[in-house]
Image (tube, helix red, strand yellow):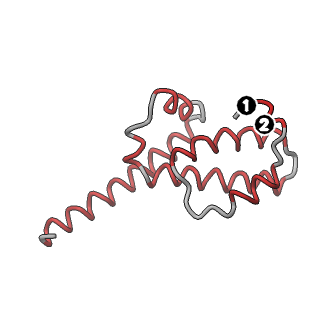
């Protein structure tokens, strides 16, 4: 997202659009983090800041639920994730670990049942 586009960001309109997303692609979630971080710096409205936080949590969840896709992230994407800080990384890592464990257990159950 170029600086000219960032300068024109209308936070309420952005939130109105993303609130309608049923599913967030993990690759899009990484891009959304940049927009969310910027939007948080240009708005002083507490309700908008709260909505940005909620959307950021949805993006984090999208990454966590699709843990296997994170294995294919390139160095630039990994660097962007590292810049989000330890709290973000821990949340994604723990969510990913939980999802991977659930997937593993589901696979073991199917194997025992002969599927």
27 vs 19, left or right, is left
Q: Position of residue 70 (x, y in %)?
A: 42, 42
Q: Position of residue 80 (x, y in %)?
A: 56, 32
Residue beneath the point at 40% across and 48% down = 67
Residue 108: quadrant of the picture: bottom left
Residue 33: quadrant of the picture: top right
From the image, which quarter does the C terminus lie in? bottom left
Q: Residue furthest right?
A: 44
Residue under circle 2? 6
115 vs 14, left or right, is left
Residue beneath the point at 57% across and 47% down = 29
Q: Residue furthest bottom?
A: 113
- How many badges with numbers are in the image? 2
Taking depth in this image into account, of 17 and 55 the one nearest to the observer is 17
Element type at mark 2? helix
60 vs 49, left or right, is left
95 vs 107, left or right, is right
Taking depth in this image into account, of 86 and 66 the one nearest to the observer is 66
Residue under circle 1? 2
From the image, which quarter does the N terminus lie in? top right
How packed is label 2: few (under 14 Cα within 10 Å), some, or many (20 or more)?
Answer: few
Q: Position of residue 8 (x, y in %)?
A: 84, 40
Q: Position of residue 36 (x, y in %)?
A: 70, 44
Residue beneath the point at 74% across and 57% down = 51
Element type at mark 1? loop
Q: Which mark is residue 83?
A: none
Q: Is residue 66 above or below residue 7?
A: below
How packed is label 1: few (under 14 Cα within 10 Å), some, or many (20 or more)?
Answer: few
Q: Is residue 110 above or below residue 70?
A: below
Q: Are marks 2 and 1 in contact (CB under 8 Å)?
A: yes
């Amino acid at each position: 997202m170029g600086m000219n586009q960032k300068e024109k960001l209308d936070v309420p309109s952005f939130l109105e659009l993303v609130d309608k997303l049923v599913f967030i692609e993990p690759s899009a979630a990484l891009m959304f983090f940049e927009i969310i971080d910027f939007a948080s710096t240009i708005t002083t409205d507490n309700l908008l800041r709260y909505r940005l936080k909620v959307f950021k949590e949805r993006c984090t969840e999208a990454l966590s639920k699709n843990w296997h896709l994170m294995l294919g992230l390139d160095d630039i994407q990994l660097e962007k994730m590292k810049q989000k800080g330890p709290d973000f990384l821990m949340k994604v890592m723990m969510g990913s670990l939980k999802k991977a464990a659930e997937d593993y257990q589901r696979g073991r159950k199917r194997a025992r049942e002969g599927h």
